[in-house]
Every structure is written in structure tokens, then in C-alpha cells.
Image (cartoon, rainbow, N blue to C red):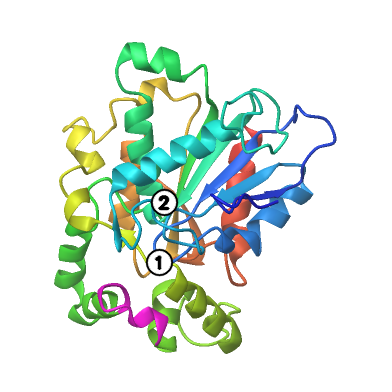
Amino acid sequence: MADENFFSLLFGTPSDKKPKKPVLAFLHGSFHASWCWQEKYLPYFASLGYPCVAFSLQGTGGTPTVEEGATKVQISSHVADLDSFLRGLSDDDANSLGLELGEDPKIVLLGHSFGGLTIMKWLEQYYGEEEERNINQQKINLAGVSLLCSVPPSGNGKMTMRFLLRSFRDSWLIIQGFVLKKAITDKAICRELFFGGAENDNGISNEDVERYQSYFDRDTVATIDLSDLAKKLPSMKVDKQSGKAQFVDHLPSKSLVIAACDDFIVDEEGSRESARYLGLEAPVIVDSPHDVMLGKNWKNGADAILEWVQGL
């Protein structure tokens, strides 16, 4: 089911209006939209009885920006959109999306790449002041949080420096792919950044790449405002000794951070930083490229999520 504002997707809707299993809510990263979850993850988890939703941030997936013609969107706008979306999953909300998930559905929130950082900022806001937390908790029944190949709390800056020290070629490839947007037009760059290298290395055909690149073109009409984000990074509000977010003790359950061993975009140290942010010792590492939800290895990440969700 699609909502014209969020382009949300719903699979595995239970016959009653109070699902026994939590709703899995997926958030995408840069150059992507909700389509990236639709191909593998949503049908898979829906087949196991989990209601699944995903939505496209403004300026992606064909959605308009709030400010007409804008090419940059501030992180606060993405956080506000995410908050509205999560509240709209409840049938009892004034702005309900009408997905018939019940009045107080349990929600597991999962974010990939820059979607993970957006979730960090949302959690920072949601678990803000004590009095705000008591009010907000009545409205969103959060059951768990998972980050997949997430941009770390300190953003891309420290990772970029590590890439420069490790390999000028790798750092230049990332600049070409994202800043110059050559991932949209150059198949080799697109493959290496997102899908793990040469054709068939990860079960992604040339036709798949061309299709994904057409989505990338549409999904980069408006991108995140990095200069604005640099002033508001989640790392600015962590415990300086442990790297842990201030709200961790208020989370409803142990979180899950997934890293991919063949991730060209987010390095292992970045994923470890994200794990520390959520109070974890280390990420769970799976055999996959950056786009864990696509290609032949998609089930590696999905099974790690399933094992975690079953324990919530």
C-alpha cells in the first residue's frame, strides 16, 4: 500500500488490527528511497508474519521537498518527517496513515547508511528532556533499533580522513561517486560503491545496475545539507569516554548494529563507533557489500535482523 505523501509500503498485514509481531519500519540512505527494501527485505519479513513499512525521505522516491525546488534538505526536516511517519503508523493518531496496524503497534526501527544517522538524530530528540520523554513514549511504542552500514555519529569527516590515509584511489572514487554523482552514470563506480565490484560478484546484473542508477538519478533531486549536519552531528552529545549516547539507558531493548565486510563506503571503525553510540561492544559483521538489502547476499543481513528481532 502506498501513501501519496510518504510513498510507504506495507506487506504482511495481519487479518486483525493488532499484530502479534512488531512492525518493521525501514529507512533508506543517500541515493536510495523505499524501493531498496521492496525487492528482498519486505517480502521476506512479511512472509514470516511481520508487518513491514518503508518510506521515502522528501526529495527521494519521487516525493517533493517541503520547500519547492530545494536541492538540500536539513537533517531536522528528515527527523520531523520520520517522527510524523512513525506516529502515523498508529490508527489512533490524528494524522494516521490508515495502515490498520492497531492503536499502539510495536515498532522496530531499522536504518541503512544515512538513514541510520537520521535515526540517531530522531532518538536524540525523542529521548530528550525527561518531561518530553514521558509524553512522547505514550505515542510511539518503540520496540527496538537497528542500524545497517550506518554513517557513524561523527558523520563522514573522520571516515574521509581514514580513506585518504589508506588509499587515495578509494577516497577519490567516493568523491566521484557521491559528490560528482558519477554513481548515477558510471556502472563500475556504482558497482564498487554499493554492490561489491564486478558483474555477478554479488548477483547484480548490468540491467539491475542501469535500473538502480535510474532510481539514483531520481533520488538525488534533493540531498542532505552536509554543512548544516556538520553543526548537529550526534557525536556532539555522547559520553566522551565511552562514545555512548545519553539516551541509551532509556532504549526499550538491546539494539543491533550491522556492518558489512565488503562495505566500500562505511569502514569497520565507523560501524564500531555506531555500535558504541548505542551501548554495544561491537557490530555484527555480515558477508555483504554496502547495500546489504540487495544482491545475492541479502539474506545474510536479513537473518541477523531476524535473530535479533525474535529476541525482542
Q: Position of residue 27 (x, y in %)?
A: 49, 50
Vertical comparison of 82 with 174: above or below: above
Tell me the chief SS of the magenta region. helix
Q: Is 180 covered by the magenta stretch?
A: yes
* Left or right of 35 on screen, residue 270: left
User: In this orientation, does residue 312 appear?
Assistant: no
Residue stretch rendered in magenta on the structure: 177-185
Residue, far front: 68
The amino acid marked with disc number 1 is: Asp
**Dot 1 surroundings within 10 Å: few (below 14), some, or many (20 or more)?**
many
The amino acid marked with disc number 2 is: Gly
* The quadrant where residue 266 appears: bottom left
Secondary element under disc 1, as helix, strand or loop, is loop
What is the distance, in whole Å, between disc 2 and disc 1 at their CAs? 16 Å
Residue named by callout 2 = 115
Residue drawn at x 37%, y 46% as measured from the top left: 78
Q: Position of residue 94 (x, y in %)?
A: 57, 26
Secondary element under disc 2, as helix, strand or loop, is helix
Earlier sequence position, callout 2 versus callout 1: 2
* The quadrant where residue 31 appears: bottom left
**Dot 2 surroundings within 10 Å: few (below 14), some, or many (20 or more)?**
many
Instruction: Please state which of residues 93 and 126 is positioned toward the viewer in this rendering.
Output: 93
Residue drawn at x 14%, y 70% as measured from the top left: 165
Residue drawn at x 52%, y 16% as measured from the top left: 138
Residue drawn at x 51%, y 45% as measured from the top left: 110
Q: Which mark is residue 263?
A: 1
Instruction: Please state which of residues 76 and 305 is positioned toward the viewer in this rendering.
Output: 76
